[in-house]
Amino acid sequence: MTPTNFLENNFPNLKLESPLFYSWKPSIRFELGVNESSLSIHENPVYLPGVYRRAIDLFEALHAPEDELYLVVDVYDFGEGSTLQRKLNVFAKYVKHQSILYRLQHETFLEENEDESYRIHRFSLRCHRSDFHYAALLKAICNQDMGKSPSIHYPIYFLNETKGTIYYVYDDRGCDLLGVDTETIRWIYNEFNEWILDYDRVEINKTFS
C-alpha cells in the first residue's frame, strides 16, 4: 500500500495540503503555541518548550508503538530539481537505522494553477514511531518560523494506517488532526479539549455534539 492508496480508501477526495482542517470532517485543530507573557514569542523562554510539549504529547497519544505509520514528506518542484536531495535529508537525519530506508516510496503528481504548473514529489516511509526520532522531528517542524535550528520548511504528514488518522503540525501555532469518522478521534477531542483552537471551537464542537 502507498499513502495514495491509504487516502483513497480512508479519506476519499482529500487533497493532502494545508490547511487540512478545512478540507475534511471530522477534524480538530489544536493550538500549540500559547503565549501568556507580555514578551513576544521570540523573547519568551517558555513559549517554544510549551509548543514542543503539546506537539509531542499529541503525537504520542495518537500513535501507539505498534501502529503502522506513513511518514510523508511533500516536495514542491518548480523546476529546481537540485532541491530534491536536500529535502530527502529528513529521512536520513531522523530515522534511527539507515537500513529501513529501502522502504522509501516515491510518487509524483503534476499540479497546475492559473500561473504555473509544478510537480509534487511525495516521499513516504512506512514505519513505526520507534523507527525515527519523532520528538526531534516535531521540534524541527515547530522551529520553522522561530529562527531556530534545526528547522524544516516543507510539509510533513503522519498517516496512521492502523487507526485511520492524519496528524499534521503546520508550524509553532498549531496542528490538524483528521479521522476517518467521528468516533475514531472522539477520545482525543475529549482528552485534549482544552488545547482546541478557540477560533474553530464552535465548529469543532458541532462535529462532536
Image (cartoon, rainbow, N blue to C red):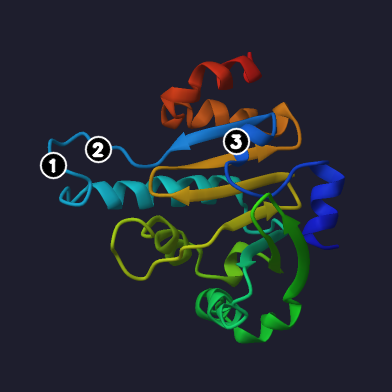
For image coordinates 63% across by 63% down, the residue present is: 74
Where does label 2 land, which residue?
Answer: 35
Q: Residues within 10 Å of mark 3 (few under 14, many from 20)?
A: many
Q: What is the three-letter code of the residue carrying label 1?
A: Leu
Disc 2 versus disc 3: nearer the observer: 3
Q: Quadrant of the C terminus?
A: top right
Where does label 3 land, which residue?
Answer: 21
Percent position of residue 151, x then y = 39, 66
Where does label 1 land, which residue?
Answer: 39
For image coordinates 65% across by 62% down, the residue present is: 72
Percent position of residue 46, x then y = 21, 48
Q: Dots 2 and 1: beta carbons under 8 Å?
A: yes
Q: What is the three-letter code of the residue carrying label 2?
A: Asn
Q: Residues within 10 Å of mark 1 (few under 14, many from 20)?
A: few
Work out whether mark 2 precedes mark 3 in sequence or the reverse, and give the earlier one: 3
Rounded to the nearest angstrom, the CA distance separating label 2 from label 3 is 23 Å
